[in-house]
Image (cartoon, rainbow, N blue to C red):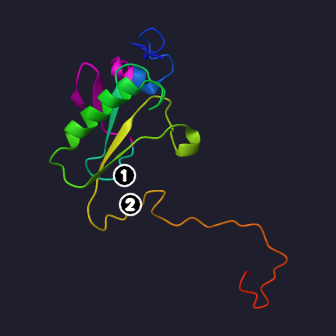
Amino acid sequence: MTATAAHGNGSGGGCVFCAIAAGLAPAQTVARWPDALAIVPLSPVTDGHLLVLPTSHVPDAVFDPDVTAATMRRAAELAQGAGPANLITSIGPAATQSVEHLHIHLVPRRAHDGLHLPWTVPAPVVAEAQTTSDDPTGAWL
């Protein structure tokens, strides 16, 4: 599979990130390269939070590994010297991908900033009820 130069023949094709890359939708652009751009998200979760996205339409990180690698390189270049940070991308709605266009979150972090990632907050464990046991102490409950 290959990326398309402009999803929907340069019109953005309904993809907000394609429209931003084509200059057809507003965004606060922080950096631009021939293959990618970095923008401030609409709702940054920390000071300095950026989205790094390819200028070509790629639905997610697995669609075109070459574009993903180039976009990650751009995110890493921006992160140099920034201190602690998360570089995060998601693949599919179940993984919290909200826009079907590859984007990498560069999220600067500070100690005790209160931002929790999905895997840092314990989720409740839902287990099937066990109705019988050979354990007479009831420790299996």
Name the residue: 48% across, 65% down: 121
Q: Is residue 128 above or below residue 107?
A: below
Horizontal arrangement in the rendering, residue 2 relative to residue 66 (left or right):
right
The image shows residue 98 at horizontal and vertical percentages of 51, 38
Q: CA distance from mark 2 to mark 1?
A: 8 Å
Mark 1 sits on what residue? 45
Q: From this viewpoint, which residue is outermost toward the left?
A: 81
Crowd rating for badge 1 (residues with CA inside 10 Å; few <14, some 14–19, many 20+): few
- Which residues fall within the magenta stretch? 19-42
Are the residues tagged 2 and 1 within 8 Å (C-beta)?
A: yes
Question: Is 13 or 128 nearer to us in this picture?
Answer: 128
* Residue 26 on the magenta span: yes
In the image, is 52 to the left or to the right of 120?
A: left
Q: Is residue 31 left or right of residue 114?
A: left
Three-letter amino acid code at the position of disc 2: Leu
Residue in the image at 57% along x and 39% along y: 93
Per the rendering, the mark at residue 67 is none
What label sits on residue 115 in the rendered view? 2
Considering only order in the chain, which callout, 1 or 2, is on the residue closer to the N terminus? Answer: 1
Residue 32 in sight from this viewpoint: yes
Could you say which quadrant of the image residue 23 lies in?
A: top left
At x 50%, y 39%, the residue is 97
Image location (x, y in percent) of residue 109: 28, 57
